[in-house]
Structures are given as structure tokens and as C-alpha cells.
Image: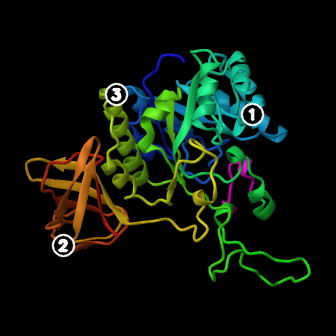
Amino acid sequence: MAEKRRPELLAPAGDLEKLKIAVEYGADAVYFGGELFSLRAGAGNLSVPEIREGTEYAHQRGRKVYMTINIFAHNEDMEQLENYLKEIAPIPIDGFIVSDPGVIWQIWQVMPQAEIHLSTQANTTNYASAAFWHSMGVKRIVTARELSFEEIRGIRDHTPEDMEIESFVHGAMCISYSGRCLLSNFMTHRDANRGACSHPCRWKYALVEEQRPGEYIPVEEDDRGTYFFNSKDLCMIAHIPELVEAGIDSFKIEGRMKSIFYVAVTVGAYRKAIDAYLQDPEGWQYEPKWMEELCKVSHRDFTTGFYFDKPGESEQNYGTSNYIKEYAFLGLVKDYDGDTGLATVEQRNKMVIGDRVEVFGPGADFFEQELTEMLDENGQPIESAPHAQQIVKIRMEKPVDAFFMLRKKA
């Protein structure tokens, strides 16, 4: 096996604000989609000026940016794709995440030196496929999600050392093979392979027999129905050493459509776990507080996916597709005045004097305090902040900084 390298923590950036949050909370790199040709059309995505600003923001802080152009393109897409690539070509994007060979070819026609990362959508499940793509000039392989540690180690052992491996370590799992799904297209005419998935795998289903139309039979004896396509969420924070030992270079967090709260908490937790490993690989120990943090954002029950074995019945949630939501995200700190102890906060959920809140920030453990003083933009005392994105000043018991966040038990 090649010598172990420092793992990259790769975070989702569904829009420019999330990109900045990911960088501030410790991501080594971020991945985002543009307004065209990304498989997350429902995410905010970045305009060309925002791609330019986000790339500069990350590079100034020593981080990398990767752009997803991972649709399966049709003939009708190719001319528009070429024009779009010419528009973004001057921006120093560090890599492009692509699944379609035609799109790879088109990128290289416009940007011959572009670094290509092969998307998980390309279903790379063996070392021969990985070696083939590397011989074609692909720098990094994003493995299929259906691989075990043993299979990933096999790919690492049989491919050149300069070929990088990226694998998902956290987030939602698609029920279809590496996300290549036709269910959305069939049921809603929204093509998952062109960025418009309607997520029918999360819907409630019942059984209907052909000769008995209109008679809906629960798959289980339960009046709620069953969610038999509904996977639990992936979480590998307890297995950092195994991820490194498998030869994975980049640890990828799913979630370009998730909130800035999700990005901050997940990136922050994995940053601490990875840094603890880098400081003492032999003595690394899993800290339950990392998982406690991850459970403070909306999530489903967790699974280790395919890493240790093929998922069975326990990896599905047949009862509900609802998220577990134990905490509410209250606000984002925009500024802090050390002389007055007042933080300028952009409200994201209603806050009321007397609320018991947790305050956390990049690289910092959270602390608890009561909301004892809030002022409106005119400096007048207020009892509550009920309006979306309302700007308020809040007295803090400890110093904070921009990008800190407030949350409370839901």
C-alpha cells in the first residue's frame, strides 16, 4: 500500500454562504455546482460571479474548490455546455467532478490542463476501472458508495500512487446504485441524472394487486405504511483510522441541499476527529461528543453503509422518512464588539429573552447561556426576534466571532 497521506476533508457548498461556512469551520476543500449541469438543481448553486468570489475566498485561506459538472449530458446540452465552460475557464477552479466521458472530453477541449475527478455516478467498483480512468488522465476517483473497506483497499493496492481516492463518509444514502436512478424520471418526469431528482425513495408506499385496483395493502402490519426505499444516513466519524488505512485520500460529506447549520456542525465535528487522528494516529480514540454534535442537526438514524458489509434490513428505516430534529438553529453571528460584549446576529429562527441557548463556532467547543438582553437595529431593547433574518444585538457571556452560531433544544 502507498504511504498514508493526510486526508482531505471535503465539504458541500450548496451556495456561496455555505462555501464560506465550510471553509471557516475547517474544510480542506469544498465542492459546489454552478447554475447549470449539476446533479443538485434544487440547491442554491453558484452564479459565475459567485464561483469567482468563492474560489478567491477559499484560495486566500489555503483551501481548494471543486466544481460538479456531473450530469449525464444529452446532445442538446453540448453547445450550451461548451459556452458555459468558456465562461468559467478563467476562474482557477482546482478540479471538476464529472461522470460523463463526453463532458470530460468537452472540459479538456476548453481547459486542457483541468483536473478531473470521476464522480461516484460513474460507478467505479474495481481497480481495473480506476486504472483505466487514471490512464485517461483522471486525477481522482470518487468510489461507488457500494464498496467495502476491503474493496477500496484493493483499488488502492492496484493503482498508481498519484491516483487519488475520494469516498463519502457522511450524509444521505441513495437507494439506487451510486445514485443512478430512474424512479424520479418515471414517476414525476424529473430526471435525477440531470439534476432534478424529486426523491421518491423517501415517499410512503403500499402494495396494490393488479385485480384489486384502489386496495392499498400495507407491506407491514402498520397503519402508517412503509418506507422500503428509505436508507439511513451514512456516518463514519467513529472510523477515521479505518478510512485512512483503506487508502482514502478525501473524506466527502454529502449535503449541498442542507443548511449552513448542517455544514457548520458536520464539518466542525469531522475536523476535530481528523485532527485528533493526525496528532496521534496510534493513540486515536473515538470521542462520543463528536457524535453528540452530529445529532444536533437534522438527521436520520445512522449507518456505516457498505464499508463493513452489505447493508441489510437494519440499514433501512421502514417506519418514517422524517428527520430527527432535536435542536433549532437560531442565528448566525455577523460581528462582535468586545467592548460592549454584544454580538450582531442574523436571526434564522425565533429567539426570546429567557431562552437557554448553545453558542458554538469554528474550532471551539460550545458553551451555554441564557438570552438576557436583545436589542433591535435601533438599539432598543426587545423581548423576541420573530422575523426571518432579523438583525439583532445579543449580549454574550463569552467572546465570540463572525461565523459563530446559536442553537437551542427544539
Say what secondary structure mark 1 lies in: loop
Residue 324 is situated, as x and y percent measured from the top left of the image, at 46, 65
Mark 1 vs 3, N-terminal side: 1
Residue 71 sits inside the magenta stretch:
no
**Which circle, 1 or 3, is nearer the viewer?**
3
Quarter of image, res 392 = bottom left
Specify the farthest residue to the right: 211
In-image side of 130 versus 291 (left or right): right
Say what secondary structure mark 2 lies in: loop
In-image side of 214 versus 22 (left or right): right
What amino acid type is highlighted by mark number 1?
Answer: Asp
Q: Image quadrant for the N terminus?
A: top right
Is disc 3 surrounded by few (<14), some (14 to 19) or many (20+) residues within 10 Å? few
> Does residue 140 appear in the picture of this structure?
no
Q: Which residues are magenta?
A: 190-200
Quarter of image, res 98 = top right
Q: What residue would you read off at disc 3?
A: 282
What amino acid type is highlighted by mark number 3?
Answer: Glu
Mark 2 vs 1, N-terminal side: 1
Measured along the vertical axis of the image, is residue 97 above or below residue 255? above
Q: What residue would you read off at disc 2?
A: 354
Measured along the vertical axis of the image, is residue 5 above or below residue 84? above
Q: Residue at x 82, y 77 (%)?
A: 208
Q: Residue at x 46, y 21 (%)?
A: 4
Q: Are marks 1 and 3 in contact (CB under 8 Å)?
A: no
Residue 359 is situated, as x and y percent measured from the top left of the image, at 24, 55
> Does residue 85 appear in the picture of this structure?
yes
Mark 2 vs 3, N-terminal side: 3
Residue 215 is situated, as x and y percent measured from the top left of the image, at 80, 84
Which label is found at residue 100?
1
Measure the C-alpha gap from mark 1 to mark 3. 40 Å
Residue 191 sits inside the magenta stretch:
yes
